[in-house]
Amino acid sequence: MNGLQNDQALQPFRLEGETKMNIQALLKEPIPTGELLANLRSRLEPIAAKSKYIADNMPELVQATIASAEEAYRGMLKLPGTGGVREFVGNPPCWLERRHNDNEFLWQLNRMTHWQDLLEAYSLTRDEKYGRKVIEEMLDWIATVEIREEMIDYPIEYFSQCHPLRALELGIRNYKTWPLVLEHLGHTELFTEDVLERYLWAVHMQIRMLRKVSPILWPKADHNHFLMECLGILTTALYFPELREAEEWKAFAIDGIERCALAQLTEDGGQIEGCPSYHNGCMFWFGLAVVLAKRFQFEFSDRYMELLRTNLDYSIYSLRPTGKCVPVGDSHANHLAVMGGVYGYLALGDMTWLGLATNLIDMREIMSEASKHVWRALDVRRFYEDLKGLQGKYYECDKLTTFWNRTLHQAIIRSGWDAEALSFLFACRSPVQNFHAHIDLMSFDFTALGKNMVCDPGIFCYREDEDRRKFKSANYHSTLLIDERDHFEYLGSFAYGPQKIGEIYNVEDRGFYQIASAYHLNYEPIVHHRHIALVDRRFVVIADRVEGLERSGVQRYFHLDFTEVEIAADAVVAASDIANLGIYTEPRGEADLLPGRLSDVNDVARASTRVRFQGTYSGTVTFVTVLAPYKGGQAPAVSIRPFADGYYELDCGEHYEVTVKERDMTIRKPI
């Protein structure tokens, strides 16, 4: 299999010179391969009807799919390490080649995500070159990647290393991309009996490995990897009930996915890792399990369905009013809240989450993101028509604007559910749940008036390099440092030193202001409390109370999504053509502007500005900061006047009295 050289390759597919595989030993009962293929075809989706409806009604999706398929056909893929552009990966791909000092390059190449575009393009156009390209790549992978019986008993560490048989890739291939080969090509002459035998042998070996190692790797079921690995096992069992292990695999996978729900989906809503991107991925994975249950006629428990519904809310809460999720932890600022909404609809028949997303995200983006999943809808016509029904409407909701997840130690406070709303996400969780977390205790992300203002930097990459360290470090977030030290030690891309207690301990709606309070002990004997409040839906007040200082350097960082930033006499002012921000603080200390970077997708970053206020202090010190967003050329007049015992008078268009104590901040409007 040396790749597609030209269109003359579009002849009946033959496997010349290869030994026919005997798959009978894999089955409960020996049956001819032709009968097995007929059984498989009886279980497949009506892909021709789906394709016709999509082709007739979704021209933009069709055009985008074919354009992406053409790139994939030429071996041009966008992967981690390629800098956000497509790169030639071989034709067929060089499956074993690790590039750009990035393990994710090899891992994600071996997930074959590009097959989805090729297969959908085949179903839409019936151009055999797309289907043959996938068959060639699949058979080349089977011939290239060594899978032997004794590998099932390899040490458990082997299945976490950088090669195509890492446990996560075993799971992802077998729920996400390889089954699409069956759906799109299984009815065709391209998917011959010989191809089926090679496919089934390779899948069977992969799932046997996965069934053994996955529960050892994730005994508590508390990681998204285990969820995807269970989905791979479940999908294989559902497509091939003739396999000897199919019933046991199905039972194991269903139980595993139920355990994942109990271990990962929190009571307040939010997947346990606290990363919005991974949360939205989990809404896809948990929702897809329900779609499979509907299709193959089984059910998940009432508790599972209840947790799924509750956690779908977090997809919307963690969505900035500007339409992309807050990239806290290992997250990207993306539109994947739409994906959560799609699977809320597909699993529960409820448009609430998609409806709320339309308030904050342009409808063209909604349609683009949702359309990526239209092939998984059991009723494509109904899904598409319901989706179109959201256009041009403001979706009313009665959801609270103050959200507190006590497990994740996150508070999300907003002024409303429109694109101009003020909103912040505030987090403080120590020790961390896993190493997708960043060193960002009491950091926050703030959006106002249609503009991202104070931002979490995002992932940028997973590589073991300086970029990874920088994007995870405390001074790339909007928080307080002592002597420029991280809150805990960075040891590597997925490794930290010991951590002490840090938590959000109160979140309240107090009428004209909503407040969240947190502290952490990672600088002991120094203790830091931070209170952050949204006041009158117009501005944010932050009070940092730091105890136990002994001529200690205190640095307060604000990572701004602005490049036009000036230090004025009374404020730091950031300007853009959308909206502006004034930062007022007392005591101010020395103010510096430092370069920063913000990343929305892998390997791509844009310029930003970090504001640092710093000074040397002893004893107990309180810092009060006002973030005042505004439009127009004139910054608001804001004054912060300190008095004794943590009492401040604040003027911001109106007069307020602010009292800061160790465990609380109160705000009053004098009569």
Image (tube, helix red, strand yellow):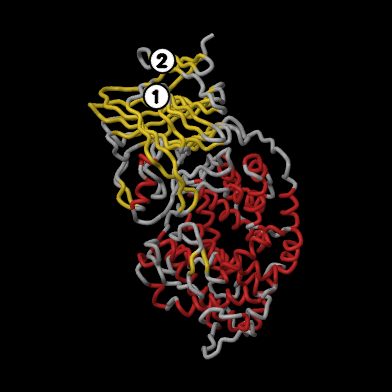
**Left or right: 398 as drawn, with respect to 522:** right
- In percent of width and height, residue 509 lies at 54, 26
- In percent of width and height, residue 365 lies at 63, 49
- Toward the top, the furthest residue is 671
Q: Earlier in the sequence, mark 1 or mark 2?
A: 2
Q: Residue at x 60, y 71 (%)?
A: 181
Label 1: few (<14), some or many (≥20) within 10 Å? some
Q: Is residue 582 above or below residue 98?
A: above
Tell me the SS state at disc 2: strand
Q: Which residue position holds label 2?
A: 641
Image quadrant for the C terminus? top right
- Toward the left, the furthest residue is 550
**Left or right: 464 as drawn, with respect to 566:** left
- In percent of width and height, residue 451 lies at 55, 36
Q: Residue at x 35, y 22 (%)?
A: 587
- In percent of width and height, residue 318 lies at 54, 41
| Residue 663 numbered tag | 1
| Residue 202 numbered tag | none
**Left or right: 661 as drawn, with respect to 601:** left
Q: Nearer the viewer, mark 1 or mark 2?
A: 2
Q: Is residue 252 above or below residue 542?
A: below
Label 2: few (<14), some or many (≥20) within 10 Å? some
Question: Toward the viewer: 473 or 3?
Answer: 3
Q: Quadrant of residue 595?
A: top left
Q: CA distance from mark 1 to mark 2?
A: 21 Å
Q: Is residue 406 visible?
A: no
Tell me the SS state at disc 1: loop
**Left or right: 167 as drawn, with respect to 51:** left
Q: Is residue 553 visible?
A: yes
Amino acid type at image mark 2: Arg
Q: Quadrant of residue 422?
A: top right
Amino acid type at image mark 1: Arg
